[in-house]
Image (cartoon, helix red, strand yellow):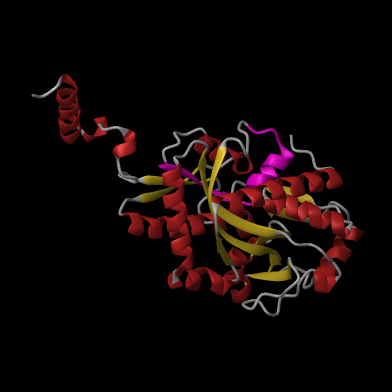
């Protein structure tokens, strides 16, 4: 004899078979529809390049489309705000960069950068390089510093926006060098970089990954690399330490995150897939040849990096007396 409970269970199962969206969320396999990667900067920059490669490989592995959407503005916080306030279902994810903790250090955000965010995995880390246009009169760091000291406030640098790593990293460098520079913010790093190439602005910091092809082709001139070691693919580019600026170590990292409340199994699956992609030879071939260090690791390790960076940049903001309106 069929009980009322059994009859109800049969009815729910039958309805779910006909209308699968009525099935309980926990019984549906993730992912069963397209995933969106939100890049908080303009297309064409380093973060956008990493996101599109990762999206393609993840799509192939999970058999679902992974689309990239650029949501620019406010140094990356517009895109971050959109993701962190989206449904925590794993279908809207943030391609985060080292700008994320910088924003937390310099401005009041419409979200809590720690409490409202679920880390998934670190993707990559690479040092920044200082570049000038190929026709720049400054052929080395010493010449640039001398000119900036002679005429304070004349030389300009670009960045992907107020509170970006190219902004605070350059302000930190200017403070160390004892010079005053003019900041020209853009909506994305690629736009700023184009103006360095054209000579509209004097210089900018950029990731080694993004800048290396332009340095090798002669379209820009590299003046220094952050960190204590030269990079194999840019062996002729001296470190800042070699040029008298010690302990200047700015790293541009990329990572994947989502809103707080992502189910643990979704976080685990995404973390596993990202780590697997980073171990693939094709990934290493694409990124490590240009000096990028592929990272991976656990969500907990990623959170530790973000917390440490927030504290680091808060100290820089205070020391350099940076104010963001």
Q: Is residue 153 above or below residue 208?
A: above
Q: Nearer the viewer, residue 129 or 31?
A: 31
Seen at 67% across and 64% down, the residue is 127
Q: Quadrant of residue 54?
A: bottom left
Callout count: 0
Asked whether 71 falls inside the magenta stretch, the response is: no
Q: Nearer the viewer, residue 50 or 171?
A: 50
From the top left corner, tell me how far across and down residue 89 is, in percent. Answer: 41, 38
Position of 113 compared to 239: left or right? left
From the top left corner, tell me how far across and down residue 75 is, in percent. Answer: 63, 43
Q: Quadrant of residue 224?
A: bottom right
From the top left corner, tell me how far across and down residue 172 is, in percent. Answer: 80, 54
Seen at 47% across and 44% down, the residue is 93
Q: Quadrant of residue 109?
A: top right
Point out the image quarter for the C terminus. Answer: top right
Q: Is residue 241 above or below residue 7?
A: below
Q: Which residues are magenta?
A: 90-109
From the top left corner, tell me how far across and down residue 28 is, in percent. Answer: 30, 40
Q: Is residue 162 visible?
A: no
């Amino acid at each position: 004899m069929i009980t009322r409970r059994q009859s109800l269970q049969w009815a729910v199962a039958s309805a779910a078979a006909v209308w699968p969206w009525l099935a309980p969320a926990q019984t549906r396999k993730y992912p069963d529809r397209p995933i969106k990667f939100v890049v908080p900067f303009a297309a064409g920059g380093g973060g956008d390049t990493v996101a599109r490669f990762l999206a393609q490989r993840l799509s192939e592995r999970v058999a679902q489309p992974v689309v990239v959407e650029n949501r620019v503005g406010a140094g990356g916080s517009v895109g971050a705000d959109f993701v962190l306030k989206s449904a925590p279902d794993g279908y809207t994810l943030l391609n985060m960069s080292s700008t994320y903790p910088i924003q937390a250090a310099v401005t009041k955000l419409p979200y809590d950068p720690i409490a409202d965010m679920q880390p998934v995995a670190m993707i990559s880390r690479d040092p920044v390089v200082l570049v000038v246009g190929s026709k720049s009169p400054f052929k080395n760091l010493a010449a640039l510093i001398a000119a900036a000291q002679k005429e304070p406030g004349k030389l300009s640098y670009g960045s992907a926006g107020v509170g970006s790593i190219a902004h605070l990293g350059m302000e930190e460098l200017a403070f160390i060098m004892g010079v005053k520079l003019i900041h020209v913010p853009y909506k994305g790093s690629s736009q700023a970089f184009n103006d360095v190439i054209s000579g509209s602005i004097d210089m900018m910091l950029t990731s080694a990954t993004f800048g290396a092809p332009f340095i090798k082709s002669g379209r820009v001139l590299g003046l220094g690399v952050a960190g204590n070691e030269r990079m194999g693919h840019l062996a002729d580019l001296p470190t800042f330490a070699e040029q008298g600026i010690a302990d200047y170590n700015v790293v541009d990292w990329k990572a994947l995150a989502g809103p707080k409340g992502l189910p643990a199994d979704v976080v685990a699956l995404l973390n596993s897939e990202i780590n697997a992609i980073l171990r693939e030879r094709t990934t290493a071939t694409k990124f490590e040849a240009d000096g990028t260090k592929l990272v991976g690791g656990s969500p907990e390790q990623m959170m530790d990096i973000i917390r440490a960076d927030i504290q680091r940049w808060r100290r820089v903001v205070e020391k350099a007396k940076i104010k963001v309106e």
